[in-house]
Image (cartoon, grey):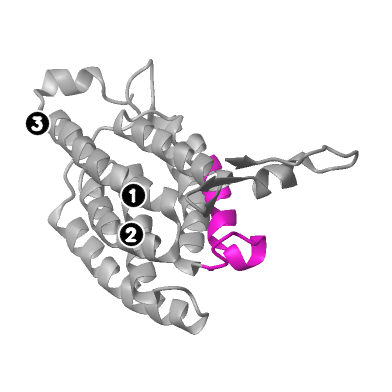
Amino acid sequence: MVRRPAVVAAGVNPIGTLLEAELHIGGSAILWREIIGNGFGLASAIGGMRRRVWAWPVGIVGNALLFTVFVGGVFHTPQQVSMAGQAGRQLVFLAVGVYGWWRWYRSRGGGAAAVLPRWATGRERALLALAMVLGTGVFAVVFAEIGSYGPLAEAWIFTGSVLATYGMARGLAEFWLIWIGVDLVGVPLLLRAGYYPSAVLYLVYAGFVIWGFVVWVRTIRAPVAERAATAPV
């Protein structure tokens, strides 16, 4: 059942009404903006797999909606649980999304894919691993200090999400593997916190990123002539 205002009075803010709209399932209240935001996120992931520029602006819209979901203590979500890692990563996604949008838009051409997938170099992999370890440790302390829910898991998800998004912008096939690591921690964390649509989407992502990884690997292994046909100009 969807909760709707009985009467739309004059002066009612339609944006505020949308932010407060809920879906009730089995006695649990779920915000529509969480569902819609995750829908935009899934669409962005599909666009990313296909290496299309529109993946970035679509993702930015989803990030903005989900930010309001995970700062539950401010926007009065049904869970009333603030998850600093989840909220913070939406802000980072916005910044990295603008960078990725610009980078892919600049390199696209004539209907071709915006980026040519490749494997990270040994140095890049070492830097990604080091950044994952250090980032998780530092942000776990930060999130614990500000009272975030599940600080260590939040730190892992936050750091991995940042690195995966950066890897996507750079065309590194390993970014799909980072997402798998994020999903493995994210699903149980979100279920415990009561963010069920986001937890379900994490499960969907887990299967989707495996598929996306296979697609990118096949592209990397394709003959040079075939890869050149879809390479950015």
Label 3 CA crowd tier, 10 Å (few <14, some 14–19, many 20+): few
The residue positioned 78% from the left and 39% from the top of the image is 6
Location of residue 142 in the rendering, given as x and y in whole percent from the top left corner: 45, 79
66 drawn magenta: yes
Label total for image:
3
Q: Which residue is label 2 attached to? A: 186
Q: Which mark is residue 15?
A: none
Could you tell me the amino acid type at mark 3? Arg
Pinpoint residue 187: horizontal percent, then vertical percent: 32, 57
Instruction: Give, as a single range, the part of the protein colored magenta.
Output: 61-82
Q: Residue furthest right?
A: 10
Residue at figure coordinates x 39%, y 68% from the top left: 154
Residue type, numbered disc 1:
Tyr
Q: CA distance from mark 3 to mark 1?
A: 28 Å
The disc, 2 or 1, on the residue closer to the chain's N-terminal end is 2
Q: Are marks 2 and 1 in contact (CB under 8 Å)?
A: yes
Q: Give the structural element (helix, strand or loop) at label 2.
A: helix
Residue 91: x percent and y percent? Answer: 53, 56
Which quarter of the rendered picture does the N terminus lie within? top right
What is the quadrant of residue 184 in the picture?
bottom left
Q: Which residue is mark 1?
A: 202
**Dot 1: what SS?**
helix
In this view of the protein, which residue sits in the foreground, 223 or 29? Answer: 29
Q: Amino acid at mark 2?
A: Gly
Determine which residue is flagged by label 3. 221
Q: Is residue 7 magenta?
A: no
Quick one: SS at disc 3? Answer: helix
Magenta-highlighted stretch: main secondary structure? Answer: helix
Q: The C terminus lies in which quarter of the figure?
A: top left
